[in-house]
Amino acid sequence: MKMMTMCKGTMVVLLLAVSATFSFAGPLKVDVNLSDYVKVEGVAGNLNSVGSDTLNNMMTYWAEGLAVPEC
């Protein structure tokens, strides 16, 4: 029982720390001088990821969005 109370207390502290981090982060600043993304020819290769299954799925969707359909 004491261990469960410690685990819950630790989780609360971690949750508060993460919440505080995001609340102090402020809005993202993007350089207004950046031009829009334009696809270019001649870029080829493989995308590899190492990590969780979630990261693997996200990388797959990202790679599919970058892929050029073969004609």
Image (cartoon, rainbow, N blue to C red):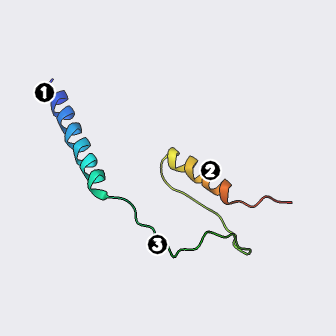
> Picture coordinates of residue 69 (x, y %)?
79, 58
> Picture coordinates of residue 28 (x, y %)?
40, 62
Dot 1: element: helix
Q: Amino acid at mark 3?
A: Asp
Q: Amino acid at mark 1?
A: Lys
> Picture coordinates of residue 5 (x, y %)?
16, 29
Q: Between residue 71 and residue 55, name the one nearer to us.
A: 71
Q: Is residue 37 above or below residue 61?
A: below
Q: Is disc 2 surrounded by few (<14), some (14 to 19) or many (20+) residues within 10 Å?
A: few
Image quadrant containing the C terminus? bottom right
Dot 3: element: loop
Q: Between residue 27 and residue 6, name the one nearer to us.
A: 27
Q: Disc 1 designates what residue?
A: 2
The label on residue 61 is: 2
Decide: marks 3, 1 in contact (CB < 8 A)? no
Q: Is residue 11 left or right of residue 37?
A: left
> Picture coordinates of residue 62 (x, y %)?
61, 55
Q: Quadrant of residue 2?
A: top left
- Considering every residue shown, the one lying at the far top of the view is 1
Mark 2 or 1, closer to the camera: 2
Dot 2: element: helix
Q: Disc 3 designates what residue?
A: 31
